[in-house]
Image: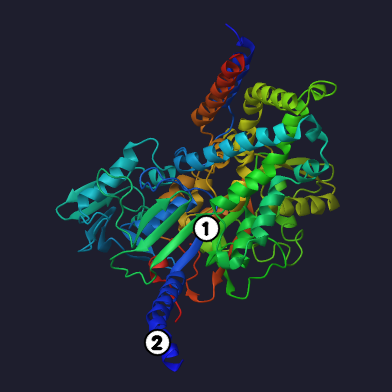
Amino acid sequence: MKHWQGWIIWLVAIAAAFGLPGTVWHQAAAPAFPWAALLPMVSLLVILGLTAPAMAGWLGPNGAKHGMLALFEAPPDFLWGGLLLALWPSAWGPPGLAAFGAAFLVAALPSEVRWLCAAMPTESPLPIAYGLAAIRRTRRTVILHLMPRWLAARVPLWLTAALVLERIFGVQGFGSDWMQRISHRDRLGIAVWMLAFALLWRATRIWERR
Amino acid sequence: MLSLTHERKNLMRPQVFILLLALASSAMGIAQTVEESFARDPGPLDFIHGEGYEQAIMQSLAGDALVGLDAQNQVVPRLSDRWEIKGKVLRFHLRDGMRFMNGSPVKPEDIAWTFQEIQAKEDASPTKRGVLQGVKVTLNGSFVELSSSKPAARLLMELAHLPVTRKDHMDEGSGPFSLVRKGSEWTFTARNHFLKPKLSAIHFRLIADDQALLQNLQKGWLSIGVPPARNNLHPPPNMVELRQPTRAQLIVFSQAGLAPLQALEKWRGEAFPVNFFSAKAHPSRGLWPESLGFPLMKIQAPAPLSLRGQHWELLYSSGDELVQKALLALRERAKQDGVDLEPKPVEAALLYQRLQKGNFQLASALNIYDPNPWSVLELLEPEGPMNFCEWKDAVFAGLAAKLDSPNSPAWRDLQKVWAVHPTALPLLDFTSVVWVDKRLKVEASALGLYLTTPGPAGWDWTK
């Protein structure tokens, strides 16, 4: 069985979810999964999943040292969320899902682009010596190879890190669901989340092999 | 030229009229809908399993209990328009014309089904299961009869928090508002009901973050909201600050004996400067909540000669800024007496687990008492949910049997017994501070804005 080490880690994580200590005062039923958030959250991840590699392909490995990218990466996501909320005109009414999505992308994109750029191999002396067409082809191949690992490593992180922006914009998303399950000690629900992450990891392994 | 202008004016008239009409109707719509927020997702409306404050608000808007509590904490008719107390039996007469959301009439069978379902299901609301423990529900013609070993006055008050749902449906009440949920927004629309709600709708959005809530209030996107507990925070010009007494207390439980409680009883009066908590809280004074009508009483035991050199670890729920601030102030006061009081934050579920196991020296927890004096028995009863330190006394059972009304003299005797060797002490009494739109007429009460009768059904916009 290939990847058995990875499966052991995921099984330990699932077991830890079931063994999570703590008891809740006046235990309520486990929260329902926010199905209404599924489409917006998946759409955001698809946008992020397409934009970040495209920008990384455009910037190349030098993007990892790009000053502007570092500048935008530095502020934490709550700062972007808070800034957008503060600047949002009162007359427009409360910002909703679109503002949440914008803040999420502004907060997530720079670091994702830099992550991908930093993982790309150097282009000097080759393929620079072969010209622009060779550079483009190399970058495309590199990005396609990096994508599975990038998704497996970063998607779980962004799904849960979105919690801060969800709280600021009043959006019920996956981050809130994850957090609620922990505070409710919904051990089965947390284990299902772990299983979903494990399956995502497994799917990216298959993708990478192909 | 003149005629052209005249024609244009004629052409524009209907457009202007339509525009004005649209503006007026949208302005009316904004004015009549109350904008509110939930700090947590209350989950689906569920009269059987639903638990928590947000769920209680939803149930009070979309459902009717047999009786209600008014702003003065008096039992008032709701689904039942009159009742009789015959010994330990409560007989309820149902109000005519009450209908569920689907239009079907409310029948005694629905009430019996709701109560029996709560009793039968292990995953039903723990609070409601506690109320209905040992209660027998019988249908007697068109009446509903409830019998219990509890005093009838106590059961009657507790029933105000048990809204009824349609038989075989867990989410269909008969309340003054009907609920539509869309994503993280909940809209309650007024319906035909005997309380005759004056508002057209109440719209809730999910705002979990304190700072985001404050910005929403300051930008005028909310009609009602609880501001964060910070000093020098003033409501925006379009809002007023409403202060309501609550039955919430921060209680310290002691497994380390009486000495820490005696010290804390002294320090709580000295550690906090004036306005330390702004309007949100003040130091508790007695042993049991003043808001429930209990007289002030001090611990009746000789004080220890010296506490110097003592080290006490005090657990508290992490993330509560106000509680942390209070405990740090107490720590500084304790230092003056040579005591090392160490506040230690613990995640809420881990804290409760340690409370249940008795695995602590000192531990603090926030408790919201039910609006009846019997709720303090949770600290004293052998199986009481807050008797974490296994308090017992030989005379308790005899005195408890005499607690048949809120004015029974046995209450004072019981408090004296508790005062000799308590295992818990309140540190802070909380006040609910709410910012409300100046145009909205609401009624403040110790139960909050929502959980009374008529509650939001009695709110109105000033003209």
- Which residue occupies the foreground of this view, B54 or B408? B54
Say above or below: B219 vs A1.
Answer: below
Q: Mark 2 highlights which residue?
A: B7
Q: Is residue B257 visible?
A: no
Mark 1 neighbour density, 10 Å: few (under 14) some (14–19) many (20 or more) = many
**Quadrant of residue B248 in the image?**
bottom right
Q: Mark 1 highlights which residue?
A: B37
- Which residue occupies the foreground of this view, B83 or A123? A123
Q: How many marks?
A: 2
- Which residue occupies the foreground of this view, B442 or B387? B442
Direction from residue B338 to residue B322 in the image, left or right = left
Q: Secondary structure at mark 2?
A: helix
Q: Amino acid at mark 1?
A: Ser
- Which residue occupies the foreground of this view, B445 or B204? B204
Say above or below: B316 vs A14.
Answer: below
Q: Chain of mark 1?
A: B
Closer to the camera: disc 1 or disc 2? Answer: 2
Q: Amino acid at mark 2?
A: Glu
Real-space CA distance between mark 1 and mark 2, rounded to the nearest whole angstrom: 50 Å
Say above or below: A195 vs B448.
Answer: above
**Quadrant of residue B57 in the image?**
bottom left
Q: Is residue A183 visible?
A: yes
Give the residue at x 81% y 32%.
A62
Q: Secondary structure at mark 1?
A: strand
Q: Residue A25 appears at what percent x and percent y?
A: 53, 41
Mark 2 neighbour density, 10 Å: few (under 14) some (14–19) many (20 or more) = few
